[in-house]
Image: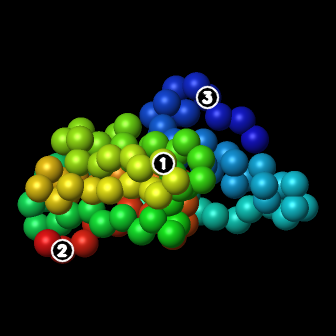
Amino acid sequence: MSISRKDFFRQSLFSLGKTALDIAETVKGRIPNIPLESLGAAPSSEPRPDLVAEAFNERCLARSNSCSACVDRCKPVAIKLNPGVGIRINPQFCNGCGECEYVCPVDPKAVVLVPR
């Protein structure tokens, strides 16, 4: 199980999450059988005015640790971190690009795009 530095930075936190899952599955004694094609492609980063991000803080890692993947990736600065609570999304600033959903390391996602 190795990943090149170039691939790691290209896939950002997605690679880190997948590697962590691979390690966890190996420790459990099972070899993961997740095809990479099913994990989805990177978003196009094109603004989608018909969509807006919605937070599900009960799933959000920001409640209990310092995860700020979506906050760091949000270009329009629509996501704010509330330690101990989770995240808050300002729908007026959200452009619907989907970057936050893509980098969210939990499954099911704590940030998803929904119609406005």
Q: CA distance from mark 1 to mark 3?
A: 33 Å
Label 2 Cα crowd, 10 Å radius (few <14 / some 14-19 / many 20+)? few
Q: Quadrant of residue 25?
A: bottom right
Q: Nearer the viewer, residue 9 or 72?
A: 72
Is residue 25 left or right of 86 when viewed as pictured? right
Question: Can you name the residue that lies furthest to the top here?
Answer: 5
- Mark 1: which secondary structure? loop
Q: Which residue is mark 3?
A: 4
Label 3 Cα crowd, 10 Å radius (few <14 / some 14-19 / many 20+)? few
Nearer to us: label 2 or label 3: 2
In the rendered view of the protein, which quadrant contains the C terminus?
A: bottom left
**Mark 3: which amino acid?**
Ser
Nearer to us: label 1 or label 3: 1
Q: Which residue is mark 2?
A: 115
Q: Position of residue 21 (x, y in %)?
A: 69, 54
Q: Quadrant of residue 111?
A: bottom left
Q: Position of residue 93 (x, y in %)?
A: 14, 50
- Mark 3: which secondary structure? loop
Nearer to us: label 1 or label 2: 1
Q: Nearer the viewer, residue 110 or 41?
A: 110
- Residue drawn at x 35%, y 52% as measured from the top left: 100
Q: CA distance from mark 1 to mark 2?
A: 27 Å
